Image (cartoon, helix red, strand yellow):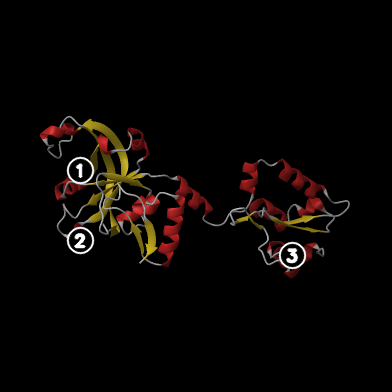
């Protein structure tokens, strides 16, 4: 690789050098990728740096291509027999970096933070069935949702719930336009109480002493468009993420759990409408197939 002067690295030659660093290997394989035992490709590029002859290292510290190394991990360093301190310092930092620091130093694709936030957010939405129009009406009026403790996977999961949504079944709501998930609310408080303490709806006598979780919501927000039943329903409750809830068109999509299912769903959703095949009750079944329709 030919060296450029300080003036040269700001022009066409510098860009050519960067393209060479980020270009293809002789066999046509993208540089910075390697094939693992699984047959997958993984990007292993750490950064891109151009070395060029320039004697004044102190003056160069103010140059944009030196500053860009810290910002983007792509840039240039001066390098001559008597001008090696910046390169030495940089190499020492790289060698001594921990894996965590090395990861932070590398440049990430746009959206990486949001991607991992979505992946790690977990199931922070409880989607529950309702007894009928009366429960929805009262819940809307008093900004709450109640569910038997026995319907929850464990009491520990209560602390993870940030949103609740109500699923209106075909059996309880005659008008097809009223079925599905139409409302979601952000949880501001919750408490475990006896069913008889929920005064807004008179309980059946045999349920009065049962433990219920009462979720208080900030307000009920309409989902537009609503999430359709798609021929299925929710028996008691299911858990999903806000990310999936905001993008689902049918309730079966809310049950996507594995990374593979989620990735397949995202790819196929990008190409058009998606059908997630389930058993009748989504919360009792499992994902059978994700396909375009």
Q: Which mark is residue 17?
A: 3
Q: Nearer the viewer, mark 2 or mark 1?
A: 2
Q: CA distance from mark 1 to mark 3?
A: 65 Å
Quarter of the image for the N terminus: give it: bottom right
On the image, the x and y values in percent for residue 200 come to 15, 39
Q: Are marks 2 and 1 in contact (CB under 8 Å)?
A: no
Tell which circle, 1 or 3, labels the residue nearer the N-terminal end.
Answer: 3
Where 208 sits versus 251, above or below? above
> Residue 84 placed where, x, y %?
83, 50
Q: Secondary structure at mark 1?
A: helix
CA gap, disc 2 and disc 3: 61 Å
- Is 91 on the left-hand or right-hand side of 165? right
Q: CA distance from mark 2 to mark 1?
A: 23 Å
Residue shown at 25%/58% (left/top)? 231
Of residues 54 and 203, the one drawn nearer to the viewer in this rendering: 203
Q: Please report the residue visible at 38 percent of the width from the left and 62 percent of the height from the top.
A: 291
Depth order, front residue of 80/267:
267
Residue under label 1 = 142
Q: Which residue is mark 2?
A: 177
């Amino acid at each position: 690789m030919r060296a450029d002067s300080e003036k040269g690295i700001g022009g066409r030659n510098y860009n050519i050098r960067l393209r060479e660093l980020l270009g293809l290997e002789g066999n046509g394989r993208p540089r910075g990728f390697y094939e693992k035992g699984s047959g997958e490709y993984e990007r292993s590029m750490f950064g891109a740096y151009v070395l060029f002859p320039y004697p004044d290292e102190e003056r160069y510290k103010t140059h944009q291509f030196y500053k860009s190394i810290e910002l983007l991990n792509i840039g240039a360093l001066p390098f001559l027999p008597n001008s090696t301190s910046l390169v030495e310092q940089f190499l020492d930092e790289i060698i001594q970096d921990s894996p965590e620091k090395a990861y932070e130093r590398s440049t990430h694709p746009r959206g990486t933070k949001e991607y991992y936030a979505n992946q790690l957010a977990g199931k922070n939405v409880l989607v529950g069935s309702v007894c009928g129009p009366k429960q929805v009406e009262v819940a809307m009026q008093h900004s709450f949702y109640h569910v038997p403790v026995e319907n929850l996977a464990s009491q520990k999961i209560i602390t993870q719930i940030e949103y609740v949504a109500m699923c209106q079944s075909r059996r309880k709501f005659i008008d097809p336009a009223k079925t599905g998930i139409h409302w979601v609310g952000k949880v501001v408080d919750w408490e475990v109480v006896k069913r008889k303490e929920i005064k807004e709806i008179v309980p059946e006598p045999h349920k009065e002493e049962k433990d219920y979780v009462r979720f208080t919501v900030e307000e009920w927000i309409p989902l537009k468009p609503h999430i359709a039943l798609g021929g299925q329903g929710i028996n008691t409750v299911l858990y999903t993420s806000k990310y999936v809830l905001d993008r689902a068109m049918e309730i079966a999509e809310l049950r996507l759990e594995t990374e593979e299912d989620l990735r397949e769903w995202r790819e196929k959703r990008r190409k058009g409408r998606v059908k997630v095949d389930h058993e009748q009750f989504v919360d009792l079944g499992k994902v059978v197939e994700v396909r375009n329709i």
